[in-house]
Amino acid sequence: MRNVSNHPRLPVVLCLVTMQLLCSSATKALDTLSGQALATHCIEDLEATSGRFCQAYFQGVLDTLEATTRANDQATYCVPHDLEVGGLIGLYLRESRLYPEVLGTPASRLILGMLLKFFPCLRA
């Protein structure tokens, strides 16, 4: 029996498989998740009770917004400290049912718009 590691075509095959894997990525770095896709993921997560895509996505967007919008100490939205991410997800799903025409918009923009709409900072 011949040793596979000594096969003359093994490096070529490994290279081709690696290229196939690298080129077949379904999500590219600059692709955006649509509002509809996020709503679908959130509903699936709620039904499965084990999925965490929706919560992780929301938390990632919130963390990014926190880092970028508050860098200048100029808050544009003020979410109550006791509000959990699940509450924001519920609000997002309610809004997605009320305004399905905007669900082609990137989900991160819809989340920011929702935060600005429902949680404006009160200026003294």
Image: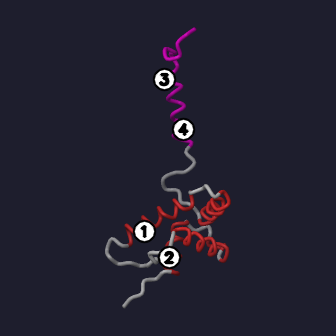
Q: Which residue is mark 2?
A: 115
In the rendered image, which quarter contains the C terminus? bottom left
Residue type indicated by callout 2: Leu
In the rendered image, residue 36, in percent from the top left (x then y), is placed at: 63, 65
Mark closer to the chain start, 1 or 3: 3
Residue 96 in percent (x, y) is at 63, 72
Q: Where does label 3 land, which residue?
A: 11
Looking at the rendered structure, the kind of residue marked 4 is: Leu
Of callouts 1 and 4, the N-terminal one: 4
How many C-alpha atoms fall within 10 Å of the one at disc 4: few (<14), some, or many (≥20)? few
Residue at 51% x, 59% y is 56
Q: Earlier in the sequence, mark 4 or mark 2?
A: 4
Asked if disc 1 and disc 3 are in contact, CB closer than 8 Å, the reply is no
Local SS, label 3 = helix
Q: Nearer the viewer, residue 88 or 21?
A: 88
Circles 3, 2 touching at the beta carbon (< 8 Å): no
Crowd band around label 3 with a 10 angstrom C-alpha radius: few (<14), some (14–19), many (20+): few
Tag 1 residue: 65
Q: Does residue 14 show up magenta in the picture?
A: yes
| Residue 22 image point, x, y percent | 51, 40
Alpha carbons under labels 3 and 4: distance apart: 15 Å
Q: Which residues are magenta?
A: 1-24
Specify whether residue 73 is painted magenta. Answer: no
The disc placed on residue 21 is 4
Name the one closer to the observer, 85 or 18: 85
Q: Which mark is residue 57?
A: none
**Mark 3 or mark 2, whichever is nearer to me:** 2
The quadrant the N terminus occupies is top right
Closer to us: mark 1 or mark 3?
Answer: 1
Picture quadrant where residue 25 is located: top right
Q: Are marks 3 and 4 in contact (CB under 8 Å)?
A: no
Q: CA distance from mark 3 to mark 2?
A: 52 Å
